Image (tube, rainbow, N blue to C red):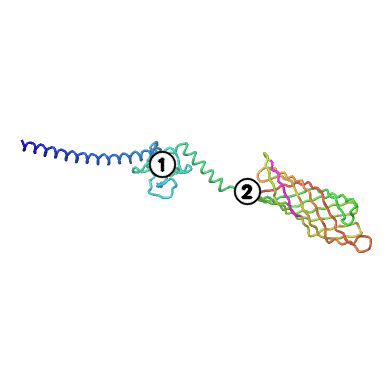
Amino acid sequence: MGNKGFCANLLLFRVKIRYHKAMDIFCRIVKISSAKYLCLFCLIFLSVEALAARWAVIGVSRAKIYSDVKMTKVIGYVGKGKKVRVGEKAKNNGLVLPMLLKNRVVYIEVSSLSEQTDKAKQSLKIVAKRYLDKINQKKEIRRVGVYTGLFYGLLFRNDFSDELGQNLIFTSFGLRGYYRSLEEFKGYRITTEYMSAEKDEAQLSIPLLEFSFLLKEVSYDKYKFDLYFGPLMTPYVEYVQGEDFKITGQALGAIVSAELKRKLKENYTLHLDASYQALTFYNMELPANGLYPKEFEPILNGFKLSASITYSY
């Protein structure tokens, strides 16, 4: 009875050992299988867009395969005529499509494929257009053109405070140039003109230089309104009073201007301008014959209407 009990216990012990070994092996198998299934699940989940795929044919002699969507590293090539399975949704602004290669998600350029979906083609066209627009986009505008205008001004002698100004109508013509930066709010206008007026026996001739800065710009439909302000100067002024005398001098002043622009055909633009300007004359010495005051520094101010047509380049 004792031997039978001992044998039974020994057999039970061996069964338990085998059971534990079997369970240990089973757990290991389950763990390995679980890991494999987990990896497979992750791969399928991460490449779901690539699996929702279509067949495409390589259309270039050698298509590059990239490891990442940013196309930073080339990991291989595919020859022309090969069929590849690619995803439907383009990445990296429409430049690449995902594909599976040896259970790994890689990327191929859309332009390498001869059979592209309409969506991929459209994405590529949009990206190409944006790129070309950025390259061709102007950073600045330069214009130059002819200029003409009428100036109605009053001429005052500064040593007679109670004197009424002498009204003069000037005609002017010249050249006008514009500069406008498109990257920042910066622009200016340069004008070289010749003004002249004649009344009774008096003649006044003024070659004038204007350098104005753009202060404000407002766009409305096909029109643009610009506001300019800047200095005026002339190195030479000529004033003739019949046969009595002829004197010369210089002048300094300022101008404020409101300008309307409208684009014409091609690169031409029409400019209409209304401005107020003032000039003070210096170093104009009258004849010392006792008939005229010793000091003569007249002031000229008034309004001007002008027009110009410019060509942009």
Question: In which quadrant will I find the N terminus?
Answer: top left
Residue furthest right in the image: 290
Residue under label 2 = 182
Q: Amino acid at mark 1?
A: Pro
Q: Residues within 10 Å of mark 2 (few under 14, many from 20)?
A: few
Measuring from the top left, give residue 216's x and y in whole percent: 69, 46
Secondary structure state at the residue bearing disc 2? loop
Residue under label 1 = 98
Among the two numbered marks 1 and 2 on one chain, the one whose residue lies closer to the N terminus: 1
- In this rendered view, identify the residue nearer to me: 248 or 276: 276
Distance of label 1 from label 2 (alpha carbons): 39 Å
Whether residue 61 is visible to the viewer of this picture, yes or no, is no
User: Which residue is rendered at x = 46% and y = 44% of the image?
Assistant: 92
User: Which residue is rendered at x = 76% and y = 52% of the image?
Assistant: 174
Secondary structure state at the residue bearing disc 1? strand
- Most prominent secondary structure in the magenta stretch? strand
Give the magenta part as a residue range.
223-231
224 is within the stretch colored magenta = yes
Disc number for residue 296: none
Measuring from the top left, give residue 281's x and y in whole percent: 82, 57
